[in-house]
Amino acid sequence: MGERCRAVLRVLVLQAAWALAGGQVRYSVPEEAKAGTVVGRLAQDLGLEAGEAEARRLRLVAQGRRASVEVSGASGALLVSSRLDREELCGKSAPCALRLEVLLERPLRVFHVQLEVTDINDNAPIFRVDEETLNIAESSLPGSRFPLEGASDADIGANAQLSYTLSPSEHFSLDLQKTDEDGESLFFVLTKSLDRETIPVHRLVLTATDGGRPSLTGTMELVISVLDANDNAPQFNQSVYKVQLPENAERGTLVIKLNATDLDEGSNSKIYYSLQILSPQEGKDVFGLERNRGEIRLTGDLDFEEVSLYRLQVDATDNGTPPLSGHCKVVLEVVDVNDNAPEVWVTSLSVPVPEDASVGTVVALLSVSDRDSGANGRVRCWVWPAAPFGLEATFAGSYSLVLREALDRERVSEYEVEVRAEDGGAPALGARRGLRVPVSDVNDNAPLFAQAVYTVLARENNAAGAELARLWARDPDEAGNGRVSYSVWEGAAGGVGAAAGSGWRAASSYVSVDAESGRVWALQPLDYEELQVLQFEVRAVDAGEPPLCGNATVQLFVLDENDNAPALLPPAGSAPEAGAVAAEVVAKIRAVDADSGYNAWLRYELWEPRAKGPFRVGLYSGEVSTARPLDEADGAHHTLLIVVRDHGEPARSATATLSVSLLEANEAALAAGSSASSSGSRSAVGVDVGGAAASAATNVWLVVAICAVSSLFLLALVLYGASRWAPRAAVLSGPGPTTLVCASEVGSWSYSQRHSRSLCVADGAAKSDLMVFSPNFPPISVNTKNTDALHVSPFQVLNCRKPRTEVDVKMCSCSARPSKTLVEDLFLVD
């Protein structure tokens, strides 16, 4: 045993080299090497640095059978892990080469290593039986030859080259013949005539010696019985018969029918056949021989992949005394048929695959084989469906499943890939191997709102915390990449125009957006008089890395509520003489309402006195005029209570108290500014709102008022003349929000606190004028559940007539009562 170990150590040789064609490493190791024996420094031969083999997980890929070697994680050396028996691994095949696949990660690479297991002389020759009996007639002539079954040696090469010796005998010798056609044939040769009466039985020892160093031997005892004369042995017409049979032949199939002849007569010529299996020994269960007819039939299954060639020996023995035998060989060649489908193994699978993986990324490593030979063993492989993956051949029978097209998880989140293999047989056989390749998500989709612009209507005086709208952005990514949070984006021009003098305010001071649900909340009650339109942007941001975002614009229109009562302005009055004709204007009640539309449309009512008196009030103009001619019987002082109401729901009102005093004629003449004197003691009318004033002071203010009215009248004439040459439908507007105030016999509109820069002019009382509103936001269409659609164009035109020349009142008469819906929902901005 010690000598054998020394022989193993002497034979151990490391051969590591790169193959020029494919980058293949080759090693050799003798069989029966001890566990832990270093086969080769694999990491060094692959060009890896120290420690890189362990960091990149250098390892062997498991194959269909145990490789008996392993890779050391620490040193990167290829070691023997278990007993290596070349005969068990490869049988009689030479050379015995094991193909190994070595996997290296980060990046993923595969190397092919060929490990040759070299033979050592560890198997002695073995005979089939320990004792063989030969019956030889004494009449046999010297030179007669008797076939012997030789020994077998599981080793290969020189270790399996057998030589035979026979124990010393003067009657017998050995003859070993070697031919390319039927291999070795061992014959037992009679060298000297036998004499049964002298020696009836000869016992010899046959020794088989192999060519190993040291050589091993095996022995078999030969027992030769000398028989009485039967001098003609059966003879076959051929010494070797060759037969071909497909491997799918059924049991009972006739292999060959043999016929031997014997020249003797009688019982000496009756022949019986017997069968011996020369190689391989497993064939004894495959064939059967009909001993009387010489027919060889299949009793088992043929398998080309297991045994491709059988050598049989058939003995024909006569019934003589002693019986004589004739011999022949039958060489059966098994013909391959396509009875093995290809086999597909997945040796490595890297999933899931990120959707941003580059084209050419290796997803899986596959191994394909077919046990058939020739065209039946040639396999072609492909992937179904053809996209987005493909196969690349890396080595004989090895393939890589690689990415051929870009992935999109939002379109396809998982692929069911089928690797198909088909051999070249007729008919062809195929195999399939299914792979599930999930695609992992990356943050490649930004949140997207259903609309780019949202239009929201909200009435003023809403409660703080009221929900105004609900926005939703879709992100097709998954998990955190698709989780969206909302916020008001201050990065854009998210401010609004507030009331005069308050400047600009950020949108976040008015509204807030719930980060999770996208609901838009009001942070404070809205005031139409302060804010009509609020435009801001809502940003949706996902939780990916890096985060992606999307924006939507929200246009919030505030609808007016009747929350402001009319406010009175200083009065304008005249001083006609007593006895003036009916419908002479005495004074004018002026009031404004901070609301808009119907909520700011004012009407004037004379509340006291209720009985018919000398005065009346214009329903929509607010002009206090005489209802009939005045005389001294009407009294010197009159107190009028006038109620001003708007058209809101509910309506709001304000009251004005007007004191009217009758003046003497000279005071009336002075108040009128006339240079002519008036005789008599006729009375005139004086007007006072809120209490009586001294007569002299009243006269002075009346003169001032008359001068002011005259100046305004002249200015109106100038403007009227200019309007004759100016374009129609002009609206004069200074900086700041533009607001229209319009009044007539039937109605009036006003926008309070924004009344100093609008003027409506026309070219005559009998003609019509056009007033143009020019908001600077685009047309909007507002659909509500219970109202008709309202469309506000960039220019809203009203038909006006009977213009006023009092610029400070900012009014113009309109041809008809305006639509309530139009007045309430009309938005006016710069």
Image: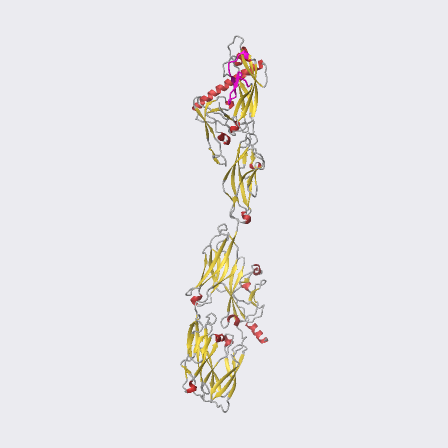
**Image vertical order of residue 557 relative to residue 59, above or below:** above
* Magenta span main SS: loop
Q: Position of residue 433 (x, y in %)?
A: 48, 60
The type of colouring in the image is secondary structure
Q: The magenta stretch spans which residues? A: 610-633
**Image vertical order of residue 522 relative to residue 604, above or below:** below
Answer whether residue 49 is magenta in the image. Answer: no
**Image vertical order of residue 537 relative to residue 599, above or below:** below
Instruction: Between residue 598 and residue 21, name the one nearer to us.
Output: 598
Q: Position of residue 518 (x, y in %)?
A: 55, 42
- The answer to whether residue 830 of the structure is visible from this angle is no
- Look at the image and tell me in which quarter the N terminus lies: bottom right
Q: Position of residue 750 (x, y in %)?
A: 52, 26
When asked about the image quadrant of residue 124, the answer is bottom right
Instruction: Between residue 527 and residue 105, name the one nearer to us.
Output: 527
- The answer to whether residue 622 of the structure is visible from this angle is yes
Q: Residue furthest front?
A: 611
Q: Position of residue 479 (x, y in %)?
A: 55, 49
Q: Residue furthest bottom?
A: 197
**Image vertical order of residue 540 relative to residue 184, above or below:** above
Instruction: Between residue 451 and residue 562, name the one nearer to us.
Output: 562
Count of number-bearing discs: 0
